Image: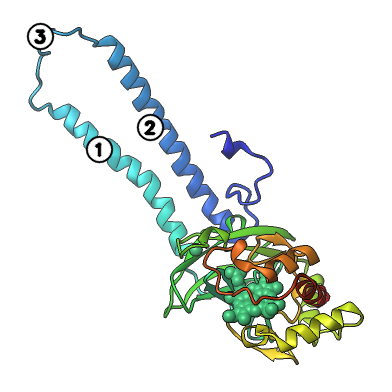
Amino acid sequence: MLGGCAWDAPMTTVIPRSDLARAILPVYEIITWTAAAIALVVFVALAWILVRFRAGTGAPLPAQTPGHSLLEITWTIAPAFVLLVIGIPTIQVIFRTQEPPPPRALEVTVLGKQWWWEFRYPALGVVTANELHLPAGRPVVLRLEGPDVIHSFWVPQLGGKRDVVPGRSNQIVLTADTPGEYWGQCAEFCGASHARMGMRVIVDAPDAFDRWVSAQRAPAVEPAGPAADGKTIYARSACVGCHTIRGLSAGVLGPDLTHFGSRTMVAAGLLPNTVENVAAWVRNPAAFKPGVKMPALGLSDAEARAVAVYLTSLK
Ligand SMILES: [Cu+2]
């Protein structure tokens, strides 16, 4: 209960920041308060019965009541009433959360992979990973797909979780309303590093979103100075088989790194995107994520650092 009272809680469900989350919140409140009221009645009654009817050892069997119509009717009707109170708003909101996207909705394909997220904007020609940018005030439809196992897309302040099922396309339709940064997390156990499959959603004001899109569409910057050495090392290492940097490599097993330096975090919300963290990650990814699908490639500290300087320069 004390944990629930934390004020600085980026994964709160009770401060909604999208139309979808605002639609779901009242159901959560109704269920919480109904359950709290019932728990109060049950525990007070239990405590009272325990104290009032306490009998020592050897006390005779109390009077037995075989069948009591009034009691039985009451405890049938009361729960049915509770189910109605919970069920009616729940069903209304379930239909609300399944609405088809409006025609002007921005489409984003969300791919859940062990243990990171890929975001593709087919109409904009943008591919990125782990940080989803959305324009405030515009409806979006997130098409959830996955190549490996079942994951679940969950950004509490933007709405309820929804499973990402291989071979199926689930979708979430929402309009984020407040620019800001929101934390998300895979919410369906998907293997060793499930707990480290986080993400960030960055909701931008519309003009900031347009600027982000043009920056993402631009080709990767040409590095100068130490970053140029990093590029050479990257280009001759196995990195190119798994990662895309447009104009340089076209791997698809790992995140697109064309604009890696524009992301705030490394490895699905795990570490701040600094040269030190990227170098440490490239040296030994498994130290950060058990079971990770990126091997350690035996780069020296100096090589890893040069690669990190290069990658973080790709704004
Ligand atoms: Cu997971």
Residue 10: percent from the left, percent from the top?
Answer: 66, 51
Residue type, label 2: Ile
Q: Nearer the viewer, residue 112 or 294?
A: 294
Residue matched to label 2: 38
- Identity of the residue drawn at 34% across and 18% down: 47
Residue under numbered circle 1? 77
Query: Label 1: few (<14), some or many (≥20) within 10 Å?
Result: few
Residue in view at x 60 percent, y 85 percent: 252
Residue 309, image quadrant: bottom right
Tell me which corner region of the image, top left, top right, bottom left or bottom right, holds residue 49. top left
CB under 8 Å between callouts 3 and 2? no
SS at badge 2: helix
Q: Nearer the viewer, residue 102 or 216?
A: 216
Q: Name the residue located 69 percent from the left edge and 44 percent from the top edge.
A: 8
* Label 2 vs label 1, nearer the camera: 2
Q: Is residue 128 visible?
A: no
From this viewpoint, is residue 246 visible? yes
Quick one: label 2 or label 1, which is nearer the N terminus?
2
Q: Secondary structure at mark 1?
A: helix
* Amino acid type of the residue tagged 1 in the rendering: Ile
Kindly indicate whether the residue at mark 1 contacts the one at mark 2 (C-beta within 8 angstroms): no
What is the tally of numbered marks visible in this picture? 3
Above or below, comparing residue 294 to residue 232 in the picture: above
Depth-wise, is mark 3 or mark 1 nearer the camera? 3
Label 3, label 1: how far apart the Cα atoms are: 33 Å
Q: Which residue is mark 3?
A: 60
Find the distance from the CA under tag 3 to the CA under tag 2: 32 Å
Residue at coordinates 44% horizontally, 57% vertically from top-left?
Answer: 92
Q: Residue furthest right?
A: 225
* Three-letter code, disc 3: Pro
Q: Position of residue 260 (x, y in %)?
A: 74, 75
